[in-house]
Amino acid sequence: MKLFIDTANLDEIREINSWGVLAGVTTNPSLIAKEKRDFKATVTEIAGLVDGPISAEVVSLTSEEMVAEAMPLTAIHPNIVIKVPMTAEGLKATSMFREKGIKTNVTLVFSAAQALLAAKAGAAYVSPFLGRLDDIGHDGMDLIREIVTIFDAHLIETEIIAASIRRVTHVTEAAAAGAHISTIPYSVFQQMVKHPLTDAGIERFLKDWESAVK
Ligand code: E4P
């Protein structure tokens, strides 16, 4: 499984990238708005930091407008992936992008039927939202498993991005289920690296070392 970071914050991207684990970045309009910076400038800087797919989302609602909005973004860097919403217009745009050789990430996927449509329209990536399904009392991981089963059965090459990750077990369970990618918030990366027994172990080793060398 590849690990992406789900943020538009440059410091967070720099830090996780320095761990040597990062394969890409996803952003969305809410994450961009949080940074209070120019959208295009932010995406340009991210593309300069991380050597992997960088998802930049369009906010237009018609396919023609989505394509027009995306063109200046695709000019930023060959790694830019256009994120489009899972709607009929988003599917039309996805198929137009495919004809132009532009990769898309179909976002806001909440059912296997939506994921199948997105793949058939030519999406390079689909993003099922685990956390938001959990929030309304569903099991987001069931959706990941269902999409993996369908894509495997039909040799569909669209990559599944486990999105709306809220906790460490979302990442490990999505990996076990066969999702190709998890896009992970900075806070969850920080939780992933930690274990109380690791901290206690370091403390004990240092204490023993100091008493032995004194
Ligand atoms: C996916 O690409 C989205 O940016 C993201 O994972 C949404 O997560 P949220 O439900 O925590 O906003």
Image (cartoon, rainbow, N blue to C red):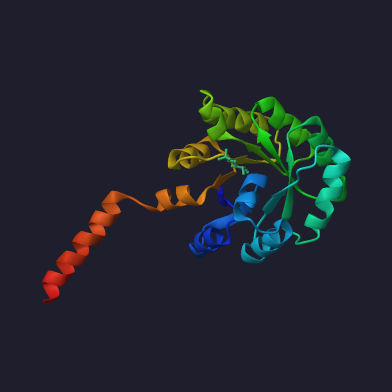
Residue 36 seen in this snapshot: yes
Q: Residue at x 33, y 50 (%)?
A: 195
When the figure is inspected, residue 209 is found, relative to residue 13, above or below; the finding is below
For the C terminus, give its image quadrant: bottom left
Q: Nearer the viewer, residue 33 or 176?
A: 33
Q: Residue at x 48, y 37 (%)?
A: 173
Task: Give the side of residue 73 with respect to residue 165, left or right.
Answer: right
Expressed as whole percent of the image width and height from the top left, the position of residue 33 reads 64, 50
Expressed as whole percent of the image width and height from the top left, the position of residue 129 reads 59, 35
Image quarter for residue 145?
top right
Count of all numbered marks drawn on residues in the image = 0
Image quarter for residue 154?
top right
> Residue furthest toward the front?
36
When the figure is inspected, residue 183 is found, relative to residue 51, above or below; the finding is above
Q: Residue at x 27, y 51 (%)?
A: 197
Task: Give the side of residue 93 with respect to residue 22, left or right.
Answer: right
Expressed as whole percent of the image width and height from the top left, the position of residue 182 reads 56, 44
> Residue furthest toward the bottom?
214
When the figure is inspected, residue 112 is found, relative to residue 94, above or below; the finding is above
Quadrant for ligand 1 reads top right
